[in-house]
Image (cartoon, rainbow, N blue to C red):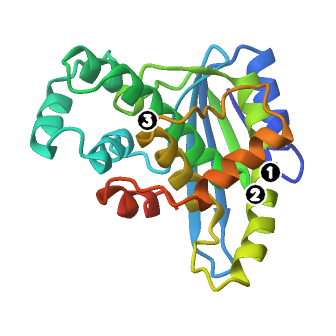
Amino acid sequence: MSITGFLSDFSLPEIFRFIDQGNKSGLLMLRSRSESGAASSYYIWVENGQFVAAANRLNNQGLLSLIQQYEWVSNRVITKLAQLCPEDQPLGLYLRHQGALRGEQLEHLFQVQVIQQLCLVCQLTDAQFRFDQNVPIPTREMTGLQLPASIIEVLLQKLVVLKQLFAARNLRYRGNGNRLSENFCQQLGLTMDITFFHCLKLSLFDTNYTLADLAKIVDIYYRPYDIPKSKFSAAKALI
């Protein structure tokens, strides 16, 4: 069974509420076109009302590519382990069991995977969506972690507020001659990496964030924190 429509008729929060309350499993696909006519697609997999994976392609390489950006393990080793991963086991959990990833690294990958896609789709206005129920979930895109769709609905609201806060802060810093990025998804992606590498507490999955807490997240981006050099190029890959 498939459900199709446009975000102008059914908003993303309404869609995730439908998935959560109906304990749905399947694939949510969103497709939009830019003013130049270029098409963009986004894929979100859910299982029993839980968000389990996301990607912008159907090539089963999204999670592997994300892991390689962090350079925690050599590309040769991570590629070989991915080939050995059983088809019925989430890639992320398999890599953890093999000692290639630590638990905190896996949690960070899942948060980035979720935020990376939602940051983009929350900015869509009249994209077309399609929800296909009971579609097999690609285990190579799965960290093995999951998140209730009800929290995704709250997360979408946070992203809207964070985008406004970043835009307001950009106006202040623009006048000071700073050349920081004004791309919201890139700003948020780099902020998550900064907090991870500096062991700062940040989980956008927390449902108790206040406006002041969200403002502190924006503050992190403008502080003079350093992260491993390779991650500056990886952060750009989030957009």
On-image quarter of the N terminus: top right
Looking at the image, residue 180 lies above or below residue 101 = below
Residue neighbourhood size for the residue with mark 2, other residues' Cα within 10 Å, grouped as few (<14), some (14–19), many (≥20): some
Q: Position of residue 232 (x, y in %)?
A: 39, 62
Q: Which residue is mark 1?
A: 160
Residue type, numbered disc 1: Val
Looking at this rendering, what residue extends furthest in the front direction?
224
Quadrant assignment, res 104: top left
State the separation of the CA atoms marked 3 and 1: 22 Å
- Residue 8 vs 51, above or below: the answer is below
Residue extending furthest toward the right: 9
Question: Does the CB distance between marks 2 and 3 fall below 8 Å?
Answer: no
On the image, the x and y values in percent for residue 114 come to 56, 38
- Give, as a three-letter code, the residue at label 3: Leu
- The alpha-carbon separation of the residues under discs 2 and 3 comes to 22 Å
* Residue at image coords 55%, 61%: 186
